[in-house]
Amino acid sequence: MRKFKYSKATFLAAAISAVNSGYVLAQEQTPDNQSSIALEEVIVTAQKRSQNLQEVPVAVTALTAGMLEQAGISNIVEIERISPNTTLRPSRATNTTLTAYIRGIGQNDPLWGFEPGVGLYIDDIYIARPQGAMVDVYDVERIEILRGPQGTLYGKNTIGGAIKYVTKKMSGEAQGEAKLSFGSYRQQDVMLTGQLPIMSDTLFVGGTFATFKRDGFGTNLFDDGENYNKDIVAGRLSVEWNPSEDLFIRVAGDMSEDRSNAKQGTRLVTSLQTGEAPQETFNSNAGLNSPQLVENSGANITVDWSISDSFSVKSITAYREGQTDSVIDFDATPLNTFDAPVTYSDHQTTQEFQLTFEGEKLKVVGGLYYYEGFASGAFDVVAGAGLGLSPEISGRETHTAFADPLFEAAPGVFLPWNPVTNDGPTFVAATKGSANTKSQAAYFHATYDLLENLSFTLGARYTKDKKDADVFKAKFLTDGLSTEFGGTNFAQLSLASDFTEDGEWSQVSPKFGVDWNINDDNMVYYSYAEGFKSGGINMRADVANSPAGLSQVFDPETAKTHEVGIKSEMANGRLRVNAALFTTAYDNVQVTTNRLFGTNFVPLVITDNEQEIQGAEMEANFQISEGLSMMLNIGWVDAEWTAFTDFDSEGVAFDASNTVIVSNTPEFAGLLGFNYDLEMGDSGKVVFGFNVSYTDEIAPEIVADAPINADSYSLVGLSAIWYSADESWTAALHGKNLTNEEYLVAGYNFANFLGEDSITGFYGDPRTVTLSLGYKF
């Protein structure tokens, strides 16, 4: 089938034409008697206090619950199409692990010990680990995406930006809602939510339960199992207490459990071992396949006290934990030559105190933050059994197929040899370790109105991080796997790493800004902000085979960003345009890479890297007429390496900045959408929606022209939502990726490793159609 494509030129031409026609039409239709037709005011807490979006001198995208519903956004990764210069993707070989980049800054390695470059916050609680962070959207009041360093308002690392997921507060009335969704691939989603007053106007209890299920987009040909299926259960329970108008207390807990099959990649090249041709999209032939288990849960207490009209304090105490058990078949063949069982676990405790002051001219937000987290894990790389090993390793020179049934793996250590299958012990490279992190921070953010229309902002955050970690990596021959995965009979061939390291880093991250309200409808601003992301210890380290002198402790990242922007409303509030230009010096960029030294495949973390990033973004909303509205978002990023350290096969370092590219960052992306509200009196109303998005070429890693890099692509969506006159009933029909575009979102690129080209890809969702029915009571 011919694919529907938009080039950058086509998209820009359509966008400019839409902007011009929309602006002219808005101007023509705004006489005084029609001035009541205007865009809805959007309230955000981007600066830790409630403000009109147009008053915030920060590049921020805000999506209310209604906007999310009308856009058909069901998972947080879909927001990347609406927020400029934002990349949110499922990490490779996972269903719920999030890879997040904003303006070219993020973290591609989800292993324990690494920290995200984009901070995810749920009700102001920092989510430290990416496992389970690809949350489904439910029970939400709004989502805010802040772009650029946000250190003076957030206690933990937000070097690239922050994603704030804000859940609904209870209304205090007895009410409930049920929502059922059915769709393509036997999608069956259920969401139930409700609340009850325990003490009138004072104490309330509420909860939400949701299940998200569907069949796979593809098939695992090895066992005829589902690939890319979904089986998730999630829930929240909260108690809210308002003993007075000035005091609010919330005690809440949440959980999620993902039992979907482990997502396996699709081979992109012919197998060197089996001769298998590239596979169809979403299909795999992975011999290592099983359901995975990703569990996350947490509890928190929030106390918000308005001491006076000017002062308020807030305390947020939270505990979270997670556990992941999964499998990865890197080569996507039935052979066990590159298979990996994996397990992760983590827990974190956070405490934040915020003080807010709002005077006539001075507004201040200050805070103290404490984080303590533990993350650990283990994985085996299974390199083959018997026939997959060299004669020197397999012992076939001394133990023929029908001779001695025992195999001497090491002096005095024997493992069984199967004379029927001519199969010997399995070769395994095992890695395990853990990392403890303690972080303390103090921050303040002050804005002073020097004149009625001119304000200055000054802020800073002091951060002190301390980490200690242990790493073990060795090669084994075994009749099972390593001890972490139930192996009982094994012999260690060589030791790559067995060490404990620690590191301590501190940083002051300043911010300065000025904003000028030209008039009631237009504001321009300038800001300078710095961001800091902690250093760490290479949890994949192979000390024995690393280049001489390379430390396994790596340095922190820093980002220094200049930004100028405008917040503007025109045509009597019917046209809103927010735009920004920015430039960032991004230093000590933490890059996880793999290099072949001799016959050893060595994972490295190197930070002698620098990027220069510049870009622009625009968000425009038009209320063209009472029923017709338009949305346009455009993002452009020009990012390049000015320094990048690489190593040749002898372990000698050299600069390779002209050979690598910036990952997970398209140069250009945009979305153009229209909504039309059709009022039908007593029959309610119908909101029709259309949108098309364009994403430039994008690479999941730093390798140029890699087979896992994605070509540019466009996605088209249509929707129709009916609301009953009393808004108690809704019926929504959403079609996504209607042209069935095939586009890569992640992949593995291991060429000629263990005798195989393990080059596999993972794809974005195909065409889907979903019907949702909702009832509020």
Image: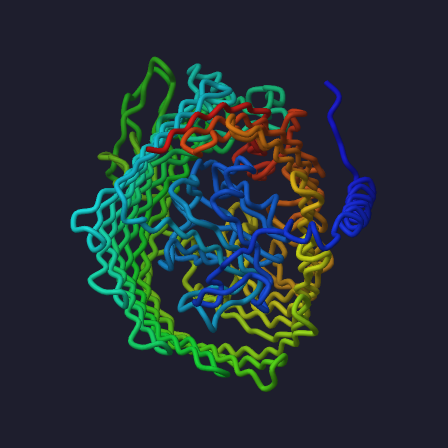
Quarter containing the N terminus: top right
Q: Position of residue 376 (x, y in %)?
A: 31, 52
**Left or right for 319, reference 518:** left
Could one spot residue 590 in this view of the protein? Answer: yes
Which residue is found at the position 29% from the left and 76% from the top? 307
407 relative to 394 in the view: left or right: left
138 vs 40: above or below: above
The residue lying toward the viewer, choosing from 501 and 10, is 10
At x 36%, y 42%, the residue is 379
Figure check: 493 above or below 118:
above
Specify whether 503 is left or right of 484.
right
Residue 107 point in image, percent of width and height: 51, 54
In x, y percent, where is residue 646?
A: 62, 59
The outermost residue toward the left is 199
User: Residue 664 location, x and y as percent?
Assistant: 61, 49
Indicate the quadrant containing the C terminus: top left, top right, bottom left or bottom right. Answer: top left
Q: Is 473 located above or below residue 221 in the figure?
A: below
Q: What residue is rendered at 48% in x and 66% in y?
A: 533
Answer yes or no: is residue 482 visible.
no
Residue appearing at x 73%, y 58% in the figure:
658
